[in-house]
Amino acid sequence: MKKITDYRRLLGVQENTGLQEMKTIYRNLMKNWHPDKFADNEEQKHEAEIKCKQIIEAYHFLVSIAPETKLQTLADYNKTTGTSGITDYNYKSQVLTINFVDGNTYEYLGVPKPVYVKFINAESPGRFARRHIYNSYTYRSTTKLTATADV
């Protein structure tokens, strides 16, 4: 998915970069781009503020889909997707967002439109999702911060 690739490029990390290494890279980038370093030049300060926001967004997104984060939250994820019903869903730009009865919300990235169409037309969307979506696409929780890599 383009968003993941762009965020990795922005931070300069690879797919297999661990959380600790990503945290170090993130902190170094924030030091380099902190707006206070550009207090003398208003234009550069504004550019640094924008860059910092992009770095923060990229870091939090990549942490949320990191294998270590998924491993930490796997039991909760399996409980939600295995036992909780779907209350609502939304699809935009190959991102399927599913809200569950237990209050959790997950985004599934890179879901093709034909799969989404089959999902919404399925006799049992929950069963279809268990078979074709939950373990087939990169996902992330959007209900709470799931990573333990502190900023």
Image (cartoon, rainbow, N blue to C red):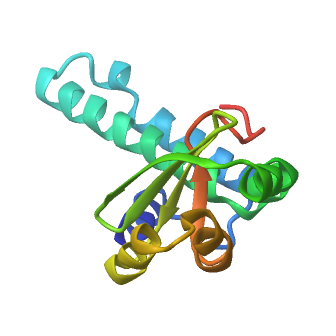
Asked whether, in this view, residue 59 is left or right of residue 51, the answer is right
Asked whether, in this view, residue 130 is left or right of residue 121, the answer is right
Question: Which quadrant of the structure image shows residue 129?
Answer: bottom right
Q: Position of residue 149 (x, y in %)?
A: 74, 40
Q: Is residue 54 above or below residue 34?
A: below
Residue extending furthest toward the front: 123
Q: Please identify the quadrant where the C terminus is shown.
A: top right
Note whether residue 145 is visible: yes
Q: Position of residue 8 (x, y in %)?
A: 48, 64
Q: Is residue 38 above or below residue 58?
A: above
Asked whether, in this view, residue 123 is left or right of residue 2, the answer is right
Question: Which quadrant of the structure image shows residue 128?
Answer: bottom right
Q: Residue at x 43, y 60 (%)?
A: 96
Question: Which quadrant of the structure image shows residue 137?
Answer: bottom right
Relative depth, front residue between 100 and 17: 100
Relative depth, front residue between 146 and 44: 146
